[in-house]
Image (tube, rainbow, N blue to C red):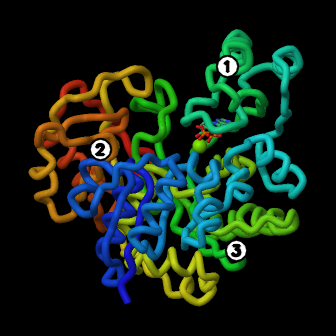
Amino acid sequence: MAIDVLVVGGGGREHALAWKLKQSPRVGKLYVAPGNAGTANLAENVPIGVMEFEKLAAFAREKKVGLTIPGPDDAFVGGIVDVFKSHGLRVWGPTREAAQIEGSKAFAKQLMHETKIPTAEFGVFTTPHTALAHVRARGVPIVIKASGLALGKGVYVCRTVAEAEQAIQEIMVDRAHKGAGDEIVIEEYLDGPEISIHALTDGSAHILFPPSQDHKPALDGDQGKNTGGMGTIAPVPWVTTEMMAGIDSQVVAPTFEALEKRGTLFQGLLFPGLKVTLEGPKVLEYNARFGDPETQVYMRLLKTDVLDLFEASVDGTLDTVGRSIEWNRGFAVNVVIASGGYPDAYKTGFPVSGIMEAEQDEHVVVFHAGTKKENGILVTSGGRVLGVSAIGGTLKQALDRAYAAVDKIHFEGMHFRRDIGARSLS
Ligand SMILES: Nc1ncnc2c1ncn2[C@@H]1O[C@H](COP(=O)(O)OP(=O)(O)O)[C@@H](O)[C@H]1O
Ligand SMILES: [Mg+2]
């Protein structure tokens, strides 16, 4: 029997989830709240904000929505799942308590420390004075992080003591990230390429998605400021099956065990960000939801009906359903096109052209992130505007297709990285 589904969020991740859900023969009506111009093409956008949990729950009840799938971190950390459950509504993802593993980096580091999960050495500080003393004792490079959610802007990789002092000033004294910076984590700098791991769980069994890789800095060659993510590839060709097995046994499984020991049931998606160092993979942080733009490549690769996976995660049947998960062969990539100036201040409202031309290649799907329709015209409305995804038999083929499609798209000031996946080609 078909069920109606509500996706909560309005970014590229939610467009990709809606795009894949739309292909399920078991999905009836599909709603996205608040959605974007891309989701409007395949679902009904609902003008309710991501953090308006009671309004969203009332909508889900009124429309007899059979499953709600929230996307964004702040929704989970804010307790959207708890609110839906308190209304007796079926909802996917971690509770507020379980999402603390993302919502508090201090909590996450403590859990990793106690569980001996490989991660950077660290200290937790609540005053600028003790934080500064630690930086001076440790020296640079060093990494300073606001413990709470900070829109992906709370991490400072510091190469000089002056930079570190500035970071502590911004986070703790100027309160640039408000309460998220009341506690800070200062950690050892780790060198090496980054990978994203996605583990779907029902609270008992879990399955690993193929490894993916995001590119955080704004500019080619990993230059410029960190962003929400400028592009992804999956799978990552140099991540071996053995490496994935090691990550499962040394990171993913022990994390779930440690949460269980604390009496915390984690259902949903655990996404550890890792650095592959000379000493092996080490955890940078945990996210308690799908990555954006990782989701865009996963949805292009996934063969299995994604509703089956969400329902198995909610119903506790992942043990059997997970075993039959199927992925398309080959590679998927997603190149993010951002507004000029992003991740700093940027202007919006510029008309976007060329998406239809880009999608003329059947291997290409353009996911919207910061877009909206204004008087019938598609215009930019956010920092990350589009994700141009492509699949291919080889990574090179997928990248060539994606970049050929990117070149057909235009809006004033647009910028994107030319080197997504380039390091994995050799
Ligand atoms: N210990 C570290 N060593 C080197 N780089 C780091 C370290 N911690 C974080 N980074 C860099 O900063 C980025 C953001 O850090 P992360 O902990 O993932 O926070 P968030 O995603 O919440 O902003 C990472 O993707 C990585 O590039
Ligand atoms: Mg991160």
How busy is the neighbourhood of tag 3: few (under 14 within 10 Å), some, or many (20 plus)? many
Placement of 220 over or under 310, stated as above or below: above
Tell me the kind of residue under disc 1. Answer: Arg
Mark 3 vs 1: CB contact within 8 A: no
- Which residue is under mark 1? 175
Q: Which comes sooner in the sequence, label 3 or label 1?
A: 1
The amino acid sitting under disc 3 is Gly
N-term mark: 2 or 3: 3
- Which disc is residue 386 wearing? 2
Q: Alpha-carbon distance for marks 3 and 1?
A: 36 Å
Comparing 72 with 303, the one in front is 72
Q: Judge: label 2 CB < 8 Å from ligand 1.
A: no
Q: Identify which amino acid the numbered label 2 is placed on.
A: Leu
Kindly indicate the quadrant of the structure image that contains residue 241: bottom right
Query: Local crowd at mark 2 within 10 Å, few (<14), some, or many (≥20)?
Result: many
Q: CA distance from mark 1 to mark 2?
A: 31 Å
- List x then y, in percent, for residue 100: 72, 50
- Above or below for 338 versus 156: below
Tell me where residue 133 appears, x and y as whole percent: 88, 16
Decide which of 237, 340 is in the foreground and name it: 340
Binning the other alpha carbons within 10 Å of mark 1 as few (below 14), some (14 to 19) or many (20 upward) gives some
Please state the total of marks drawn on the protein image.
Answer: 3
**Whether residue 133 is visible:** yes
Nearer mark to the viewer, of 1 and 2: 1
Image quadrant in which you'd find residue 184: top right
Label 3 belongs to which residue?
203
Name the residue rendered at 13%, 43% in the picture: 408
User: CB at mark 1 closer than 8 A to ligand 1?
Assistant: no
| First-in-chain label (1 vs 2) | 1
* Quadrant holding the N terminus: bottom left
